[in-house]
């Protein structure tokens, strides 16, 4: 990965032993590892998106072994929403509920609750909140309540995509009072503009998100 990803410094970019990452007050949040994002044939395919699947699966095993919770988010849109370009938004049609593109990647290990977002035409970037694309107040998903019921205090976020749904989920996590980390090896960016992924990581670090890698060889 580019050296700039490490620029926030050791407070934010930490090398961590993955075996010490999880415990009963931790939740692994797997963001949008769905065919339209992760499969090269997906309508909003993220470069290298499928590469995160085995890494995420390893995290799922570690998390469950340590008594942590695991939760998944799933973009789940109606066929028409102002989130989509044909209806005035910015995105190609993706993750339409009930289609192949909206399914979680077939190789993903699914071992916890799935929180859907965007079902009623909201944008649904964050796993925690959605917003009508034309404005208005954020609408909470059930993710925060689900995690709070389980006594979760820390989040480990991974999945797709760094510069949209991972970022929005991590920023909401901090806003909601969770100690939040993002796994650098298990996220990938859309990069609509070059550097969007790096800028998203900087923004998350500035908000207090810990950016975590497992070794110096992550580049
Ligand atoms: Zn979407």
Image: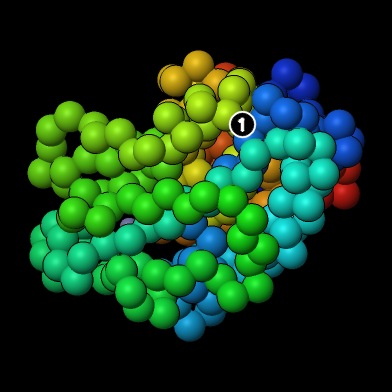
Give the structural element (helix, strand or loop) at label 1. Answer: strand
Residue occupying image coordinates x 38% and y 38%: 142
**Residue 19 falls left or right of residue 133:** right
Write down the quadrant of residue 198 in the picture: top right
Residue occupying image coordinates x 40% and y 70%: 102
Write down the quadrant of residue 172 in the picture: top left
Say which of 161 and 70 sits in front.
70
Residue 157, above or below 77: above
Q: Label 1: which residue?
A: 155
**Residue 108 falls left or right of residue 123:** right
Viewer can see residue 59: no
Residue 131, above or below 172: below
Residue occupying image coordinates x 69% and y 42%: 183
Write down the quadrant of residue 6 in the picture: top right
**Residue 92 falls left or right of residue 194:** left
Percent from the top left, x then y, of residue 68?
71, 36
**Colour treatment of the image:** rainbow
Residue 11, above or below 82: above
Residue 111, above or below 100: above
Quarter of the rendered image showing ligand 1: bottom left
Viewer can see residue 149: yes
Say which of 129 and 51 sits in front.
129
Percent from the top left, x then y, of residue 95?
35, 68
Residue occupying image coordinates x 74% and y 64%: 54
């Amino acid at each position: 990965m580019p050296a700039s990803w490490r620029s926030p410094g050791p407070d934010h970019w930490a090398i961590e032993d993955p075996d010490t990452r999880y415990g009963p007050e931790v939740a692994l949040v797997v963001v949008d590892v769905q065919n339209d994002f992760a499969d090269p044939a997906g309508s909003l395919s993220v470069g290298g998106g499928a590469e995160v699947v085995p890494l995420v699966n390893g995290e799922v095993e570690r998390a469950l072994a340590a008594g942590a919770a695991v939760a998944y988010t799933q973009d789940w849109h109606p066929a028409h929403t102002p989130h989509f370009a044909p209806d005035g938004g910015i995105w190609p049609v993706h993750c339409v509920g009930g289609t192949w593109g909206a399914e979680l990647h077939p190789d993903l290990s699914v071992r916890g609750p799935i929180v859907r977002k965007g079902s009623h035409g909201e944008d649904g970037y964050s796993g925690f909140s959605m917003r009508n694309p034309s404005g208005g107040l954020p609408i909470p998903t059930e993710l925060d309540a689900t995690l709070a019921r389980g006594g979760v205090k820390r989040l480990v976020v991974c999945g797709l995509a760094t510069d949209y749904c991972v970022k929005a989920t991590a920023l909401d996590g901090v806003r909601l009072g969770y100690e939040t980390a993002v796994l650098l090896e298990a996220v990938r960016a859309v990069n609509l503009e070059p550097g969007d992924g790096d800028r998203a990581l900087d923004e998350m670090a500035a908000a207090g998100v810990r950016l975590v890698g497992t070794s110096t060889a992550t580049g």
